Amino acid sequence: MASERMESVPPRWTLKFSVTGGGVESCCMAESHAAMTSEVLDCMAASLTLGISLAIPKTSEIFPLRAGHGANSGVSFLGVGRLCHPAWGGFFSIRTNKEIRNSWHFECDAIETCPKTPVISAPEQTYLSTCPVCQNQIDVTALEPFTKLKCPFCGQMVRVRRKFDHFIIQRQIGEGGMSRVFEAEDETLGRRVALKILNPQYGRDAARVEQFRQEALITANVNHPNVIKLYSVGYDQGYFYIAMELVTGGSLEQRIRKEGSIKEEESLRIGREVAEGLRAAQQQGLIHRDVKPANILFTETGTAKVVDFGLALFVERGPDASGEIWATPYYVAPEKVIENREDYRSDIFSLGASLYHALTGRPPHKVDSNDIAELRRVKCRRVVLEDSGVRFAPRTAHVVNRMLAFRPQERCANYDETVEELRLAEGLVGQSGYRLRFATRRARWLAVAAAVLALAFGIGWFARSTGERTAVAITDSGDDIERDLTGGGVTLQAGRKTLAERFLQAREMMVRELRFAEAGHQFEQIIKSGEARQPTLNWARYNAALCAIVLGKREEAARHMADMAGDTGEGGSLVTAELAAFFKTLGGRLAGLNGGAEDSGSADYGTAPEAVLGRLIEGLAGWHLGDPQTGMEDLRRFSTILKESLTLPEWVPLYAGLLKPYEHDMRLLASVDKLKEPASEDEAKEALDLLRETRAKLQTRGRWDEVLEERAKEFRQDLARLRMERQRREMAEAAVLRQKELAQLAEITAALPSLSQGYDFERVTSLLKDIQFQSPEVQAALEGKLYLYEQARAFLEQWFADVAEKGWQGRFQRLSGAPLEGRVTEASLRQVTISLERGVVTLPLDTLSPETLLDSAQSFAAQVTDSTDYYTRQERIAVFARVAGLHSLSATVAAQLMEEHRGFRQRWMKVAQ
């Protein structure tokens, strides 16, 4: 089926024109001296045509224009005879029959704009679309993109308004309140894209268009596997469009509608991938502002991608007296509705609300109104996953509930923490053993604490009976009891069971469940309570610092280490000299926390059995905050010591639970260590793919994320270097080939006239079709010559048909001999039959001059009423004149035709070059 052809019927504006000695504040004013001539229109008038480029053959200079009203109007001359406005996507042609020099200006009330609020406005255009079936033109001005209608001429159902710039719409794939989304083909790059076409009202405000353009530029820089890539934005036919990466796996909203709810583990995986995409956007200064299931799309393989960054910002209107807001009520954060403020934590809330919907099959808030008062009332209600009545893993409920916290400060502190929480919850789905072990251990410690309480009660009663001396003895005995019940570094005291229980619970969260944020908070409370004795206090500081390191809180970790170094507990009954030395050494090394400024491989942590934990925390400090390679080595040493040592306290191996995600990442990173400088583009691309996949699969990230990005940057530079070297080689080879093929083309061109038998170009076209050049430039020149001879043949075939149908009366010039007056009645490549007053004469066709054939062809063309047929005939006349050597006549016809027919202009410029 023929492709759609869209033409615009220009509005006409009459411009007042005057010459002045200086600048005048009017609609359009020249900023430089220029000369401009043409041969059309009346004396003091001009025609401005929006959307069509019309050449001005005699324009002597290129000159800039600007709009006098509105500093942001942005009208300027970009080429010979063309006045362009970037927001319109078209340009004006200016024509006048006067030559103007010196300063001058136009006055035009028709396109004046408000000085304060520039608005994209222009006279209403009429858009005509050519029916692909009958080739008649249909007025489609009032129709939406990709409208299906019955052609009023042939009655066939056709699609109109399918082409926007270089994008051809194939089908509609979505629709929202302010846009429609289509699958389209990019004719320039030959790829499929998602083309979002905004409703016209969003493309008319110049300020909003500029705001969105800036947002789009930032969004286009977000290059992440979990973010839909934005290719380009543009404006055509009164519509603003966005071209984006096309994915075919549907949206989360569609999946919820189809499946009811999404499996727990898969929902958490989707949430983690979306959080990673939002994190990449935040690093570019973006917040999404409209995270919802409809804006979470999937690839064919199920990878989640976030779409529509910046659209929410684009349509945001600020305070609105109508009581309505632009947001999605189900998922909008409370602070946006209640206080009209938002930041990245608002996106975290919206992501949590989307996960709640995916897990339960219904949104967290049931609201059917955009009224702000109603939304505020509804959003004041706290939501927890347990209220849904569906059972989920405790870790899943914890992370979703935290994301849905009413106060932003109660949510995850940043996206790193959000991703970590979701990853851990994903890994713990279906694993109930942790809860059982913790419950058993907790019951055991409660029993021990109860026994201590009972013993303390009995001893206290005995003390009251025997006096002060016995009480002193009892105190010593109490120290012995505490020493025996240290419980892995935790001092249990009679009457302190709550503190002990909280310490053990926090450590369990940290080493078993990897809930670093919550565990760190618990240890902070223990430290601040003032109730913890040494060494419990320093172990709380150690664990709080460890959690802070994993969460990237450098200053907080350094503070705890400094406190440990300054308060070792030395001299206390439960702190040995070796343990005090360990606290002092480790605290001093990490008080500055430059990621382990010293080489921890040479660190002497002393002889305390617990000293191996120094290797662990310094390894984590290097991994997350300093040198990740050194950190990796420390963690490996710690793992080796745990496996080989037989003298460690029984509670120290509990910390091995922390290593699981790090060991996973170490295995991934082993392949990265083997990467070498690439010798080819393929090797560089493979390395980049490996680095990208490794980054996506990392469970801990830390400083390795930055290291891998640096490695990726090096390989991108290598790739650019290798590509440049290849291109230089190819350019050198192409230059040699081009010169060789140009010489061959010159020989062929010189031989073409000898291959023509009169006006029979069959042998010429056959030869040109059989030739192929490798150089694109030479091949294009060859195709230009083939175009000329094929059109010349078409000219003759049309002339033969016209003669057979109508005949032609006129003067026949011959290449030799006297001219003849008569009427031609038959014609072919071999001969023509002409009726004269004295009889009929038959002559070979090649005895007639080309001027005779062209005069008669112009006569036939003048009788045509169909514009398409007329332009086709004029094109063939211009081509035949060129092939026949009548260059002046060919240029005259072509110049006129180029002004009126864009397609011919493009073809003719290739031939002219």
Image (cartoon, rainbow, N blue to C red):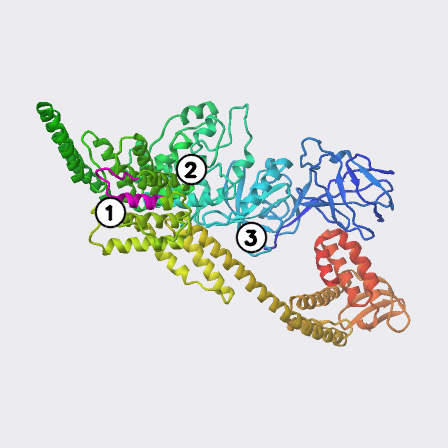
- Image quadrant for the C terminus? bottom right
Q: Is residue 462 left or right of residue 693?
A: left
Looking at the image, is mark 3 or mark 2 nearer the viewer? 2
Determine which of the numbered discs, if any, sits on residue 45 in the image. Answer: none
Looking at the rendering, the stretch of residues picked out in magenta corresponds to: 568-587
Are there few (<14), some (14-19), or many (20+) residues within 10 Å of tag 1? Answer: some
Q: Is residue 910 above or below residue 40?
A: below
Q: Give the spatial CA distance, label 3 vs label 2.
A: 35 Å
In the image, what residue occupies the spot 27% across and 56% down? 640
Q: Which residue is mark 2?
A: 348
Secondary element under disc 2, as helix, strand or loop, is helix
Question: Closer to the N terminus: mark 3 or mark 2?
Answer: 3
Q: Which residue is mark 3?
A: 185
Callout 2, which amino acid?
Ile
Q: Which residue is mark 1?
A: 652
Residue 287 place in picture, x, y as percent = 49, 39
